[in-house]
Image (cartoon, rainbow, N blue to C red):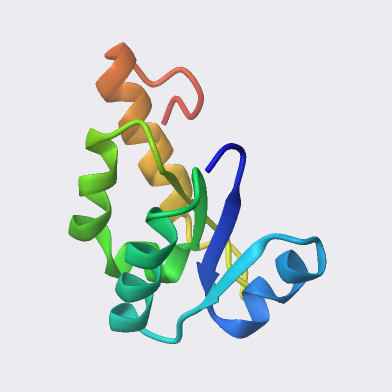
Amino acid sequence: MEGKIAIVGDGDSIMVFKAAGVATFPAADEKQARDALRKAAQEYEIIFVTEELARALGDFLKRFDEEPYPVVLPIPGSRGSTGYGDELLKRAMERALGVDILFQK
């Protein structure tokens, strides 16, 4: 599992990652994304998930916070950022540090 990276998302969003040699798991909806994450979590340490799917899988993704691996990170999809990744990062920092040091909004 060492250093292995994967991405879960819609076909357009993951195409460039596939070209770069990252394992891709296409998912068009929440159910497909959940199944793809379960499969990817068995083999990969870092899993990127497009923001649209990450938002839909919010509660499901919380289970990954309890273990060191895999690290699941939301990233913008092909349509751009929805702000969800920033929102999660802000919450995690506030939980860990007790203060917002990056966004300060």
Left or right, residue 86 beside residue 91: right
Label total for image = 0
Where 87 falls versus 99 (above or below)? below
* Residue with the most extreme right position: 19
Which x, y percent locates residue 55?
33, 63
Which x, y percent locates residue 29?
37, 84
Where 57 falls versus 101 (above or below)? below
61 or 42: nearer the eye?
42
Which x, y percent locates residue 75?
55, 56
66 or 73: nearer the eye?
66
Left or right, residue 81 beside residue 83: right
Left or right, residue 100 beside residue 58: right
Q: Residue at x 39, y 45 (%)?
A: 87
Q: Quadrant of residue 24?
A: bottom right
Which x, y percent locates residue 34?
30, 71
Where 69 falls versus 6 (above or below)? above
Where's the C terminus, which quadrant? top left
Where 61 falls versus 24 (above or below)? above
